[in-house]
Image (cartoon, rainbow, N blue to C red):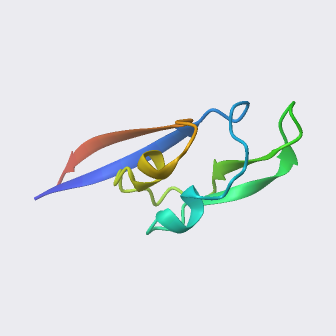
Amino acid sequence: MAKVKGSIVIDTERCKGCEVCIPACPEEVIALAKQVNSKGYRYAEPVTDGCTGCTNCAVVCPDGVITVYRIKITE
């Protein structure tokens, strides 16, 4: 049976830390960083590797700074 593994890449310099993606993630993969980007915003970052590639975070991101990658893992 094929399983899907995902990962996200967030453009931290364009992220404004609006936090819309955090509750959208069913796997609780995203949190705000303690650091700030060059514009002074705390940005979103992946904090676990539990991403399933559902794309919820990318869909709700108002600035389109999240890219989702998915691969199939066959067992």
Count how many numbered circles sit on residues in the image. Answer: 0
Residue 49 percent location from the top left of the image = 51, 55
Residue 44 percent location from the top left of the image = 67, 50
Q: Residue at x 73, y 30 (%)?
A: 13
Q: Residue furthest front?
A: 62
Q: Where, by quadrant of the figure, is residue 22 drawn?
A: bottom right
Q: Quadrant of the N terminus?
A: bottom left
Residue 4 percent location from the top left of the image = 26, 52
Residue 15 percent location from the top left of the image = 68, 39
Front residue (pair 7, 58): 58
Question: From the viewer's perspective, is residue 3 above or below residue 38?
Answer: below
Q: Where, by quadrant of the figure, is residue 75 drawn?
A: bottom left
Q: Residue at x 69, y 32 (%)?
A: 14
Front residue (pair 65, 5): 65
Q: Residue at x 83, y 36 (%)?
A: 37
Residue 55 is left or right of residue 36, and the answer is left
Residue 19 is left or right of residue 9, and the answer is right
Q: Residue at x 34, y 54 (%)?
A: 54
